[in-house]
Amino acid sequence: MHAVEFENVSKSFSEKNILENISFSVRQGEIFGLLGPNGAGKTTLIRLLLDIIRPDSGEIRVFGDFLSPAAKNRIGYLPEERGLYKKTRLLDMLVYLAQLKGIPENQARLNAESLLKSLELDQYKNKKVEELSKGMQQKIQFLSAIIHEPELLILDEPFSGLDPVNTKTVMVRILGLRASGKTIILSTHMMEQAQTLCDRILMLNKGRRVLYGPVDEIRKEHGKNSLIVEFAEKGNLNAIREISGIKKIIEHGKSVELFPEEGISVQLLLEELVRKANLTRFEKTFPSLNEIFIETLESVSNE
Ligand SMILES: Nc1ncnc2c1ncn2[C@@H]1O[C@H](COP(=O)(O)OP(=O)(O)OP(=O)(O)O)[C@@H](O)[C@H]1O
């Protein structure tokens, strides 16, 4: 059973198509990235998933079924628009939020104490939210989304406002949640984090699906088909220049990037290189998710 399934889902606002015929599924226990430029439709898709708004057509299933009120308690949501009870003390607020999701008070208090400790926030537990810095409030918002130990966690821009250390803390926490079998949907503009964390992604542009699949496969498919090599002696570069089948050579400091001619595989080129030069390193190049994001948007805007 999938955690989430969308089948040909469309949604329009005032006759403007916001999502067009979107299909995808999120597997249980994976980190699924929801990517796309501003206005692509990511938040609208999340609001459909949470049954805050209804689709014009198509079908949405969460935990294999239409979203029931009981199933809603199995979801944690960190919304893009943040809102905490500013005058309430941290610990009381977390306990209250967990109780709203059906967790008994004793258990809620235990969860809250242990989470605050794990993010090094326990010294602030009796402070009011408004007394905390923006970054700390952001971490508290993250805790509010996981306080009831949801099976499915939806995070809309969880890293905004966080410094690099806290970004790493939250990333580690997200990986820990996956390791304990939770499913995470991560909507973000931070491509580096998405590349590190996500197993699979869906990329939207103007309400349409433009990329969908495992991050590794997408990176392979968008490969530039080039090879980065380093060799023991500088003189080896001349030997490499004599090898036939190389279309272009770009020097990047210590390393050299080689582009094979059409019809010549990187593998074949590598074998030839090993015969002719003393290689100390070789690596097939894959574009980053950031490069793929930009390239995909440029190619769809030229259509
Ligand atoms: N309630 C609404 N009424 C009318 N238009 C809406 C409504 N909600 C969203 N839209 C429009 O739908 C489009 C997609 O918005 P959405 O917030 O889903 O994008 P997003 O991908 O989350 O963008 P961002 O990355 O900027 O948060 C936008 O053009 C937005 O103006």
Image (cartoon, rainbow, N blue to C red):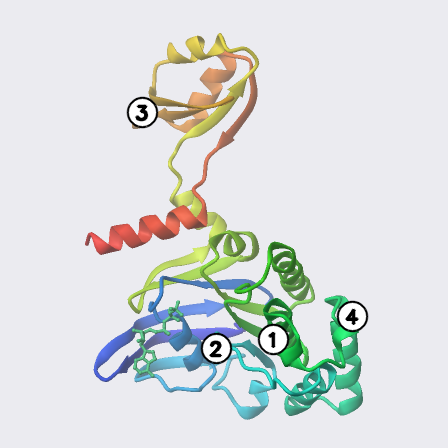
Label 4 environment density (alpha carbons within 10 Å; few <14, some 14–19, many ≥20): some
Q: Earlier in the sequence, mark 4 or mark 2?
A: 2
Q: Is residue 115 above or below residue 277?
A: below
Contact, CB < 8 Å: mark 3 with mark 1? no
Query: Quick one: label 2 or label 3, which is nearer the N terminus?
Result: 2
Pick whichever, 64 or 250, lies toward us.
Answer: 250
Residue bearing mark 2: 81
Specify the amino acid type for callout 1. Gln
Quick check: which quadrant has ligand 1? Answer: bottom left
Q: Of the residues under marks 3 and 1, which one precedes in the sequence?
A: 1
Marked residue nearer the N-terminal end (1 or 2): 2
Three-letter code for the amino acid on which mark 2 is drawn:
Glu
Whether label 2 touches label 3, CB < 8 Å = no
**Residue 301 in view, yes or no:** yes
Q: Which residue is mark 3?
A: 261
Residue at point 40%, 70% (across, down): 42
Decide: few, some or many residues near mark 2? Use Cα within 10 Å; few <14, some 14-19, many ≥20.
few
Left or right? Give the position of 124 relative to 227.
right
Element assignment for label 3: loop
- Amino acid carrying mark 4 in the image: Lys
In space, the residues marked 3 and 4 are separated at their CA atoms by 57 Å
Residue 191 against residue 15 in the figure, above or below: above
Give the Cα separation between the discs numbered 3 and 1: 52 Å
Marker count (numbered): 4
| Labels 3 and 4: the sequence-earlier one | 4
